[in-house]
Amino acid sequence: MKEVQLKLPQSTIIYYEDFYSREKADALYAALKEKITWKHEQVKVFGKLYWQPRLTSFYADNSNTYTYSSLKLTPLPFFEELLSVKNDIQNKVDSKFTSCLANLYRDGKDSNGWHADDEKELGKNPEIASLSLGQNRYFKFRHKNNPQLKEKILLKHGSLLLMKGETQHFWQHQVPKTQMKIDERINLTFRTLL
Ligand SMILES: O=C(O)CCC(=O)C(=O)O
Ligand SMILES: [Fe+2]
């Protein structure tokens, strides 16, 4: 399996391009599109409510809630396909996760703005494993203290991106909008919620 570690200071970021074969990724995409309870949620940024520019859903094997941008998520229980993805990822990266935040980017206008996954429920050095299915989308990094330090990678269908160590302390990431006519993308981010 092609495995690339990004050479960014104060980070540990590993990209596994062919985590799943095309056939497996196609089948998973279809099942997850159908079975995930996709919701359109509002978040609060500097006191103002905004519709998130994507659909989301939250799953876990415990009942711990996850709050970001004043949005409090109560988990749904894992179902078969999500659980098997969780197990495949855990075996690959030799870690365990409790929870999964799913994102559906419906087209190029959907996006995920600059942020770090550094909420206190994620613990000191959050480990986040992010599976991409469907449309390829760019994923950008920028250093929090030194914005000239940046990187962009294309997250492909069936790929896995792992962020761990100090990454969330020093780096923000985003999935930018694009003007291109593009298809939908599903992203699953596995995390551990304390
Ligand atoms: O869609 C992605 O690849 C990233 C999603 C993300 O950063 C998040 O949900 O925190
Ligand atoms: Fe994130």
Image (cartoon, rainbow, N blue to C red):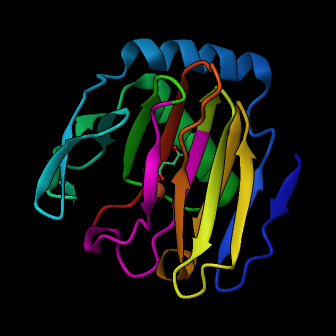
Q: Is residue 143 left or right of residue 45?
A: right
Q: Nearer the viewer, residue 14 or 116?
A: 116
State the image coordinates of residue 120 (x, y, percent, origin top left).
Answer: 27, 74
Quarter of image, res 50: top left
Among all residues in the image, which is located at the extreme left? 47
- Which image quarter: residue 35? top left
Which is nearer the eye, 17 or 173?
173
Residue at image position (16%, 51%) is 71
Q: Residue at x 65, y 26 (%)?
A: 180
- Residue drawn at the location 67% of the way across and 45% of the way down: 138
Q: Which residues are magenta?
A: 109-131
Give the image location of residue 23, x and y in percent.
Answer: 76, 16
Report the residue at 37% width, 72% height from top: 118
Horizontal and vertical percent for residue 40?
24, 29
Q: Is residue 110 left or right of residue 161?
A: left
Q: Residue furthest front?
A: 179
Image coordinates for residue 48, horizontal then vertical, percent: 13, 54
- For the C terminus, the quadrant is bottom left
Q: Nearer the viewer, residue 103 or 160?
A: 103
The single residue placed furthest to the right in the displayed view is 2
Q: In the displayed structure, would residue 68 be above or below residue 147?
A: above
Vertical placement of residue 79 versus 94, above or below: above
Q: Tell whether position 30 is magenta.
A: no
Pick the front one: 22 or 154: 154
Q: Is residue 118 magenta?
A: yes
Numbered label tally: 0
Above or below, 41 against 107 in this view is below
- Residue 80 position by quadrant: top left
